[in-house]
Amino acid sequence: MANELVSKSVEELAPLLKSKEISPVELTEAVLDCAEETQEKTNAYISIYRNEAIASAKKAEVEIGNGNYRGMYHGIPMGMKDNIFFKDKLTTMGSKIHKDYVPSYDATVVQKLRDAGVIFTGKLNLHEYALSITSNNPYYGPVRNPWDLEKTPGGSSGGSGAAVTVGASAASIGTDTAGSIRIPAAACGIVGLKPTRGLVSTHGVFPLSWTQDHVGPMTKTVKDAAGLLEIIAGHDEKNAGSVERKPENYLNQITGDVKDLVIGVNEEYFFNNIDSNIEKSVRDTIQVLVDLGAEVETVKIPTMKDADWAGFTFSVSEASAVHYNSIIERPEDFGKDIRDSLVSGFFPSSKQYADAARVKEQLTEEFNDIFKKVDVLISPTLPVMPNKIGDEMVDLNGEQVPLLPNFIRLTNPLNMTGTPTLSVLCGWNGKMPVGIQITGPAFADGRVLNTGYAIEKLNPLGGKRPNL
């Protein structure tokens, strides 16, 4: 029964909890057992809160038993990425420098999840300071991809991706500055949503880039993500970038109907130099959507030619400002890859930063124009497959290319535009999953989720589970 429970989605578990067919305690114990049993192989967690989680589950059981059911995530066990603040709980940022840091307050997303009745099972491993994309952490060990333990699960939210995949967390929250939700979602074959910028508060999330950071759901299914987004979305006066917007019911927008949906395809950038197996899976999926009534329109995005360097300029410049004192005073306490990135952030000039800002503005205008003609833009999430842990090069159709710039090539520009972007499973390359990326205009998160649901209904997962 325990194995069966941890494989279920939240949309399946919630009715069972509400009807008291299963208890939050039973479910939480199953998820904790799975977390502990798989930890040696995946290394998804930095810390596990067994005692606290069981106590919270018992409280949820009493509340539900008394008829005080709070909604879809009441009694659901979740691990959280360890750069999201928990009051009075160790929050390491996956670093040596903050290894003993204990926040005095909860992140806004944590408080919203507490209010929804979520059971917190622990803190999940990540790339140091969320500053890169492999989750190969020098202090807490590498996170391993459940589909192939020799390979990266992607990052920086690699612990979240691995834990959700194996059932060691029913769902999770990730952070995304250049793809850190969508990259591990694609690499692990789960759902990852980078919501519209400003829709979800970043208050209490350790900053990487204040203009690029996003917070969003990582889940087994699209409906799980929609239900989680309903909880964490909303204006937050503590977050300067938070927007005031009327709450939406995202679950009600998920029908799977894509008739007359206009899909934008950009060949020059988003389908240029893509692993042939990934490209085939994505194009085949687009064709199935067309067979279901969607239309395809080719779009041009001229400023995409400058997106790579502009996104890099924002991320490294702002990250270097965040870590300025530490990189000057104690550089040896960073992992080498992070130290090199932070040092490189000292070099873009004020003119280069201003030029990047102009690229961002022009790119946003071009996306706004595109979405007057199309409903969503679809592309691969990753142009290459996950590599072996520790390798800095990756295969691209028989050629060895650098991993980092390729892993973020299709995700990073969408942090500059701030548009809602979803990665969902669309197929397989051998035993490894392939992700498809769907983006829409600002605040069309429901439309993006619905498109992802239409793909999910094709059942690309096919009942597969990692063999751990």
Image: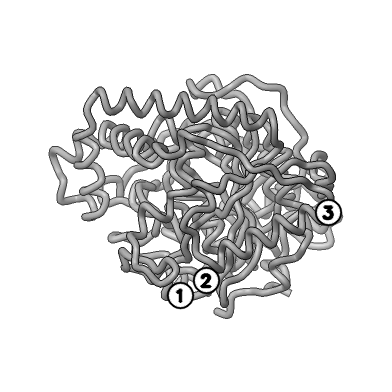
Residue 200 in view of the camera: no
Question: Who's the residue at 54% across and 19% down the image?
Answer: 237
Mark before the other along the chain sequence, 2 or 3: 2
**Percent x, y of residue 316:** 30, 38
SS for dot 2: loop
Q: In the image, what residue type sits under mark 1?
A: Leu
Mark before the other along the chain sequence, 3 or 1: 1
Q: In the image, what residue type sits under mark 2?
A: Pro
For discs 3 and 1, the disc positioned in front in the rendered view: 3
Q: Could you give the CA–CA distance between mark 2 and mark 3, rounded to whole angstroms?
A: 33 Å
In the image: residue 391, left or right of residue 77: left
SS for dot 1: loop
Around disc 2, counting alpha carbons within 10 Å, would you say few (fewer than 14), some (14 to 19), or many (20 or more)? many
State which quadrant residue 227 falls in: top right
Question: Who's the residue at 59% across and 59% down the image?
Answer: 435
To which residue does mark 1 refer?
149
Question: Who's the residue at 16% across and 46% down the image?
Answer: 331
Q: Quadrant of the N terminus?
A: bottom right
To which residue does mark 2 refer?
146
Q: In the image, what residue type sits under mark 3?
A: Leu
To which residue does mark 3 refer?
292
Question: Who's the residue at 52% across and 71% down the image?
Answer: 146
**Percent x, y of residue 397:** 44, 69
Q: Is residue 201 above or below residue 268?
A: above
